Image (tube, rainbow, N blue to C red):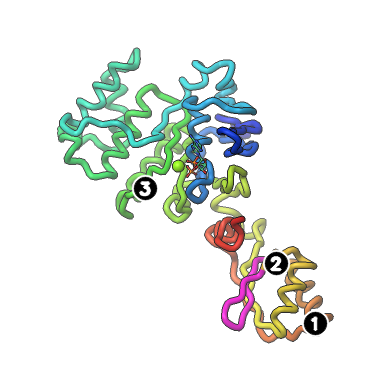
């Protein structure tokens, strides 16, 4: 059975009169990489700030290894390493000097621990180089090393792929996976771009307008995940759109002469029968398995934002 590393229980945040986070509840398991995805302004940073104790919760609680961020603050934050804003690094100091500088602020950090975190993020060769000469990807990895110094069980990264090129993203991905798989660290990684982090995550939670709208395994089994992307050529189209809405609660998109929508495989024959019964001619049906990307756009795409 999987062990819980972090639990959000009906977390809420109101600033002024605006409810920004509207009751988030989910759990993060030990050693999993959890992608926290949502468009800009969805509430990712606000949620993360509450998770790491940088901001008070209006309501609800966050349990970190069973410790409440409200009543056991010290024990709770002890388990968390995070990069929320861009990590502060001194460009005129080397990587090793930067890490030593931070290590001095945390009691009990040994030289061995510093070497260990440097190895985790693969920066051994860059330690003697000035950080001002690092690529953005290297700087992010040094930030991760710094966040790992005190040996947290959960690492939280807010939009770490922002501004990185594909090579930089690949590097981060490799070290994040290694951290989860070899060190059993849980990693929460936020992004507004699903494509950038999908490959490094075990699960994805999608947040929109302060609410969780979906949680899903990334490598879902084809047998259990049967949501299909359906393309249909039908006539008359408006009548078909109306039927889809009324009978299946589906919002179809028109693309050329076709309708696009998502439906579970087992419901496709019923839908065709319904169409025929209502005198809608079906000329073509095409189905492909919906990717997570499709689901993401379906959930938070332009059409559905209120
Ligand atoms: N200090 C604040 N005061 C008022 N509104 C805020 C504050 N911080 C964030 N917000 C609002 O909360 C919403 C969520 O913001 P944020 O958590 O930064 O989203 P994300 O990180 O997903 O882009 C936005 O609408 C933002 O304008
Ligand atoms: Mg943000």
Element under label 1?
A: helix
Secondary structure, magenta segment, majority class:
strand
**Quick one: label 1 or label 3, which is nearer the N terminus?**
3
Q: Quadrant of residue 234?
A: bottom right
Q: Residues within 10 Å of mark 3 (few under 14, many from 20)?
A: some
Instruction: Tell me the CA gap for discs 1 and 3.
Output: 49 Å
Q: Which mark is residue 276?
A: 1
Residue that carries the numbered disc 3 in the rendered image: 162
Residue drawn at x 71%, y 65% is 250
- Quadrant for the N terminus in the image: top right
Residue 244, placed above or below residue 284: above
**Quick one: label 1 or label 2, which is nearer the N terminus?**
2
Residue 82, placed above or below residue 106: below
Q: Residue furthest front?
A: 17
Q: Residue furthest top?
A: 107
- Residue 286 percent location from the top left of the image: 62, 77
Q: Using residue 110 as the reference point, say whether residue 34 is left or right of it.
A: right
Q: Quadrant of residue 260?
A: bottom right
- Residue 60 percent location from the top left of the image: 64, 28
Instruction: Tell me the CA gap for discs 2 and 3.
Output: 36 Å
- Residue 222 percent location from the top left of the image: 61, 60
Range drawn in magenta: 252-263
Q: Is mark 2 within 8 Å of ligand 1?
A: no
Residue that carries the numbered disc 2 in the rendered image: 265
Q: Nearer the viewer, mark 1 or mark 3?
A: 3
Residue drawn at x 58%, y 46% is 209
**Quick one: label 2 or label 3, which is nearer the N terminus?**
3
Element under label 3?
A: loop
Q: Residues within 10 Å of mark 1 (few under 14, many from 20)?
A: few
């Amino acid at each position: 059975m999987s062990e819980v590393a972090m639990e959000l229980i009906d977390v809420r945040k109101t600033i002024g009169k605006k409810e920004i986070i509207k009751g988030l509840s989910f759990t993060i398991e030990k050693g999993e990489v959890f992608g926290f995805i949502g468009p800009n302004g969805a509430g990712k940073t606000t949620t993360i700030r509450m998770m790491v104790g940088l901001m008070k919760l209006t309501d609800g609680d966050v349990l970190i290894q069973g410790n409440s961020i409200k009543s056991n603050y010290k024990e709770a934050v002890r388990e968390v390493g995070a990069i929320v804003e861009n990590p502060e690094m001194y460009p005129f100091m080397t990587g090793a000097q930067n890490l030593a500088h931070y290590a001095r602020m945390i009691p009990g950090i040994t030289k061995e621990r510093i070497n260990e975190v440097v190895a985790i993020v693969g920066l051994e060769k860059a330690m003697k180089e000035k950080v001002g000469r690092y690529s953005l990807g290297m700087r992010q990895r040094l930030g991760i090393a710094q966040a790992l110094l005190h040996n947290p069980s959960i690492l939280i990264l807010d939009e770490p792929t922002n501004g990185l090129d594909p090579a930089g993203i690949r590097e981060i991905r490799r070290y994040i996976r290694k951290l989860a798989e070899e060190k059993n660290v849980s990693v929460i990684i936020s992004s507004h771009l699903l494509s950038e982090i999908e490959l490094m995550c075990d699960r994805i939670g999608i947040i929109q307008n302060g609410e969780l709208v979906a949680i899903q395994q990334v490598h879902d089994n084809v047998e259990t995940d049967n949501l299909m992307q359906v393309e249909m050529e039908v006539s008359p189209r408006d009548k078909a759109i109306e039927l889809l809405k009324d009978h299946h609660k589906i919002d179809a998109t028109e693309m050329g002469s076709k309708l696009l929508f998502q439906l579970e495989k087992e419901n496709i024959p019923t839908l065709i029968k319904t169409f025929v019964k209502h005198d809608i001619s079906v000329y073509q049906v095409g189905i492909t398995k919906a990717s997570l990307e499709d689901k993401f756009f379906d959930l938070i795409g332009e059409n559905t934002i209120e």
